[in-house]
Every structure is written in structure tokens, then in C-alpha cells.
Image (tube, grey):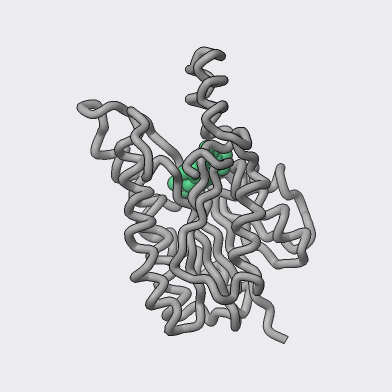
Amino acid sequence: MAEYCTVVTGASGGIGGAVVERLAAAGRKIVAVGRDKNALEGRFGPAAGVFTLACDLSSPGAADLLAVEIKTRFDGVEGFVHAAGSDIPAPLGMISAAAMQEMFAVHAVFPLLFLGWMVKKGNHAPGASAVLISSLAAHEGAKGHAAYAAAKGAVEGMLKPAAAECAVKGIRLNAVVPGIVRTKMSKKWMDCLAPASLSELEKSYPFGFGTPEDIAAAAAFLLSPDARWISGQTLVCDGGRTM
Ligand SMILES: NC(=O)c1ccc[n+]([C@@H]2O[C@H](COP(=O)([O-])OP(=O)(O)OC[C@H]3O[C@@H](n4cnc5c(N)ncnc54)[C@H](O)[C@@H]3O)[C@@H](O)[C@H]2O)c1
């Protein structure tokens, strides 16, 4: 019987880690991708069904490297969740080209190349599904996040045409659009806010800030057969902020 894997990037981070834990508990074989092998092994250890792989996804050959590793261990891919990435905040006039290139490479270029491999040579499973993690930052006007929002806007811009090509091969492609989720990434800027400002901000989320598990639940749904009729869509998960 063919053995298929689900590839999860950002696996040592908040959202990616929660996705790995949820999918592994449901019995999927996972390729957990992160930058730091020690952090990945520290988090998942010899957890059943989790194969860890260290790779800098901003490097030009990342999608090819991942493809080679997957091919040596599995017959193909049944799921892909792209949760790697960072926000390098800077106001207009202080955004560096290098920071923009880094964010575009990780958020948009890597997943498009990896999806290309899945479609062309990935030997994907019947019912295969992919989920890209975007951000509410691409829909709101938060100062200092223009470059990050542009990279996430690229993710959502490519979603429908890429989903159309994936559909020809029977692969579904969707995006989850999280509002603020408590992780290492958001802690960096939360720590710079006065407690009163943070509390005001959280009040604009009727159901509070999110947890990584909230986003993992949405990603798991979109991967599952329950979502078999959903493709090319963005699922906003923001505790009701934009309702
Ligand atoms: N936390 C939030 O409030 C929030 C909101 C909206 C969207 N997001 C998005 O969710 C995703 C996950 O973020 P998170 O909150 O879990 O952050 P996190 O910092 O906890 O995890 C992100 C992970 O991505 C990895 N990563 C970053 N650059 C990489 C690279 N070049 N190669 C390989 N790995 C790389 C990091 O090492 C880290 O483990 C990101 O795409 C982020 O933009 C987060």
C-alpha cells in the first residue's frame, strides 16, 4: 500500500507545531519542516509518524530539496500546510529590500514552487489538499506591516489561479487568514505595547486573540474529506474582528 505524507512547514513554531500535533494525533504521517533541527527534534522527539527536516525555505533550492527528501521516504504527498514565515516590521522609508525579499521568498515563492512540484511530479494521493497560512495583515491597515502585508497579499493573489491548476490534478488549495494568534511571532510586538493598548486591541476581537490550536483546527478541516467540495477559498479566522 502506498505511503503518503503531509508536509507541514513552520513546524517548530506556534501554528505549524500545533498543526503537526493535531494531524499526527489523527494518524497522518508528517514531514515537519523547520529551520532548526534541534528545535524540531526537541519538540517532536521520536513522535510516531513525524519525520523532521531542517531547511531554510527562503533559499532558492528549498522546494527541490524538500521534494528529494520526500521522494526518498514516501510514495507521495496527501497534504501540505505552509505555516513558515516571519514578519519583519518596519515603517515606510525604513523597509529594506533584503527584508522584503526574505518575506516574499518564504511566504509566496516557496509554496508556489512546492505546489508546482506537487502538481507536476509529486505523485499526490487521491483527495490531496493544501493550505496556505495568510494573515489579516493583508486586509487591514496596521502601521509598520506594509512589506509583510504585501507578501501575504501575494499569497492570496496567487490562490485562485494556483487552485485552478491544482484542481486539474484533483488537488484542493485553500488559505486560512488568521487574525492575531498568541505565538512567538506575535509576542515580539505585543511585548512592545503598553498593557492598556494590548487590552484595547484584544477587545476588538469579540472572541479574544486566537491560539495556535484554533488555526490548526481550521487547517485540519480544509485538509480533510469534510472539505472535499471547497477549493480556492480563504477562511478568515479572527475571533470575529472583521465580522
Ligand atoms: N501569530 C499571528 O498572530 C499570526 C497572524 C496571522 C498570520 N500568521 C502567520 O502564521 C504563520 C505561522 O506563524 P506563527 O505565529 O506560528 O509564528 P512562529 O514564529 O511561532 O512560527 C513561524 C515559524 O516559521 C519558521 N520560519 C521562518 N522563516 C523561515 C525560513 N526562512 N525557513 C524555514 N522556516 C522559517 C520559524 O523558524 C518559525 O518556527 C506565519 O506565516 C505567520 O505569518 C501569524
Pick the front one: 225 or 204 = 204
78, above or below 57, in the image = below
Identified at 52% across, 61% down, the residue is 131
Left or right: residue 67 versus residue 207 is left
The outermost residue toward the bottom is: 1
Give 22 or 37, whichever is nearer the viewer: 22
The N terminus - image quarter: bottom right
- The foreground one among 45 and 132 is 132
Judge left or right: residue 60 versus residue 183: left
Question: Residue placed farthest to the front in the image?
Answer: 243
| Residue at 65% from the left image edge and 74% from the top image edge | 225
- Quadrant position of residue 229: bottom right
* Location of residue 136 with respect to 197 vertically, above or below: below
* Residue 108 point in image, percent of width and height: 37, 55
The answer to which of 206 and 40 lies nearer the viewer is: 206
Picture coordinates of residue 50 (x, y %)?
71, 59
Q: Is residue 178 visible?
A: yes
Q: Residue at x 70, y 60 (%)?
A: 23
> Where is residue 62 shown, x and y percent of the image?
43, 59
- Tell me residue 88's x, y (percent): 38, 34
Total of numbered circles in the picture? 0
In the picture as drawn, the residue positioned furthest to the left comes out as 93
Asked if residue 71 shows in the view, the reply is: no
- Residue at (24, 26) in percent of width and height: 94
